[in-house]
Image (cartoon, rainbow, N blue to C red):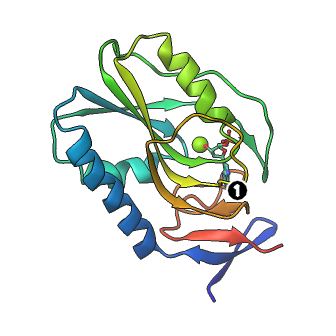
Amino acid sequence: MKKIKVKDKEFILSIPSKTIQEAVRRIAEKMNSDLKNKDVLFIGILNGAFMFASDLFRMIDFKCQITFLKLASYVGSSSSGTVQQLIGLNQNITGKTVVILEDIVDTGITIENIIKQLKGYEPAEIKIATMLLKPDAYTKDIPLDYIGLEIPNDFIIGYGLDYNGYGRNYEDIFSIVK
Ligand code: IMP
Ligand code: MG
């Protein structure tokens, strides 16, 4: 099994790139049929979602827009529980179908906070697409419209996800060795 070391921690291959790409494709195909007649603005949440957003966006075949916002709530290998402000919105989203692109939904605190802040700008609707979901960690009732893969409640890196800033560059996802 492929193993990597990032800083002081060891990680083992968990989800190969091929499986990730198939999941992204499934989301894109569903969006291409669900959203084709809407005025869609994709909002990628930086930093983690940049790879997912990039792969997904090139599979979208209807006219749409994309922008990126930043909000960091994670320090080290466990959720800090603190939530920060959304920054970087310099575009009118009123009346649009906003599709949030997240790398991972863990407890759901981040996504809840993002939705709360975006609602203030009065979009027509807000949809959520997350590449990964940790169902055992999710504490919210907010329905997630598009989910790539459900994963166990273990710390992972790769495909945009980091451990203290490192490990985002791998095309596969690796899980921490406990
Ligand atoms: P939540 O607020 O608990 O749902 O956490 C969501 C955010 O935490 C994601 O956008 C990620 O940036 C980060 N995160 C959650 N789980 C992991 C993980 O296993 N590895 C790296 N980052 C994670
Ligand atoms: Mg994130």
Q: Quadrant of the C terminus?
A: bottom right
- Quarter of image, res 75: top right
For disc 1, the neighbor class at 10 Å (few under 14, some 14 to 19, many from 20) is many
Q: Residue furthest bottom?
A: 1
Q: Residue at x 57, y 63 (%)?
A: 158
Q: Is residue 178 left or right of residue 2?
A: right
For label 1, being within 8 Å of ligand 1 is answered yes
User: Can you tell me which quadrant of the image ligand 2 is in?
Assistant: top right
Q: Residue at x 56, y 26 (%)?
A: 114
Front-lying residue, 153 or 172? 153
Please say whether residue 72 is visible from this viewpoint: no
Q: Quadrant of the N terminus?
A: bottom right
- Tell me where residue 38 appears, x and y as whole percent: 21, 29
- Tell me where residue 168 appears, x and y as whole percent: 57, 58
Front-lying residue, 22 or 135? 135
- Please state the total of marks drawn on the protein image: 1
Query: Disc 1 residue type?
Result: Tyr
Q: Residue at x 27, y 30 (%)?
A: 40
Residue hosting label 1: 163
Q: Secondary structure at mark 1?
A: loop
Please say whether residue 70 is visible from this viewpoint: yes
Taking 68 as reference, is 18 above or below it?
Answer: below
Taking 53 as reference, is 174 above or below it?
Answer: below
Q: Is residue 76 left or right of residue 165?
A: right
Q: Is residue 78 left or right of residue 169?
A: right
- Tell me where residue 43 appears, x and y as whole percent: 41, 33
- Tell me where residue 163 appears, x and y as whole percent: 70, 56
